Amino acid sequence: MDAKKNTVILGLAFVILLGLSYAENQFFFTILGDVLQNQFLAVGMLFLHNVLVVSMILIGMTFYVNLVVFNFFKREKHADVVISHPGIFAAVFACMIVFLSILRGATLINGGVTLETLPLILLVSAPVGIIEGYGIYLTIKKTLSRTMTMKALAYIYGVFLLASVVEVGFIHLLTTFAT
């Protein structure tokens, strides 16, 4: 198959997997309370969820890179600006995803986010957010700069395993001290 057909197939796969990831996300957050009762299961489930998220980012960014590299944006003047500055885009995107993830988690736990509790939520979420943000940053930067290798992907998944362990540890500590 030629490169343009592969790009179209990758785009279709991305759209289908995006729909499936939405369903997984809904299911994941409905069972999260029960899963957190068992620490080993919680680490495994959080890791699996994070791997799915970062894999979706990887597929989406690969699709975008292929669109630009194979000149799908013929009339677009600045289509390669993201690929030209992968570090800046990766940092902004990672911060945005981590912040939205923290807000989503706070909404699930408290039913909403108030300005009074937001600093505390951000402070408690900071260590996990930093680790996950680093993993997202690496994924995007390596994908956009076209330097992703199997070794780098294994390292990134290791970062998310560490984040899962830290997150479950923090949840356990918070629930222990809250009671």
Image: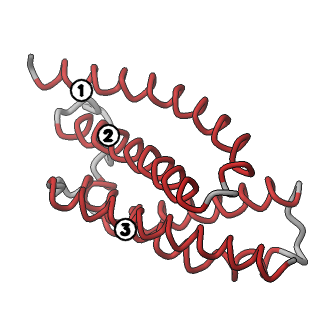
Tag 2 or tag 3, which sits nearer the N-term?
2
Q: Secondary structure at mark 2?
A: helix
Q: Position of residue 49 (x, y in %)?
A: 51, 47
Q: Which residue type does callout 2 highlight? A: Tyr
Residue under the point 54% across and 26% down:
19
Mark found first going from the N terminus, 1 or 2: 1
Residue 86 quadrant = bottom left
The correct choice, above or below, for 104 with respect to 159 in the image is above
Say which residue appears at 44% left-offset and 44% top-offset: 52
Residue located beneath label 3 in the image: 159
For mark 1, what is the residue? 7
Of the 4 image quadrants, the one containing the N terminus is top left
Q: Earlier in the sequence, mark 3 or mark 1?
A: 1
Q: Which mark is residue 151?
A: none
Element under label 1? helix
Q: Residues within 10 Å of mark 1 (few under 14, many from 20)?
A: some
Q: Nearer the viewer, mark 3 or mark 2?
A: 3
**Residue designated by label 2:** 64
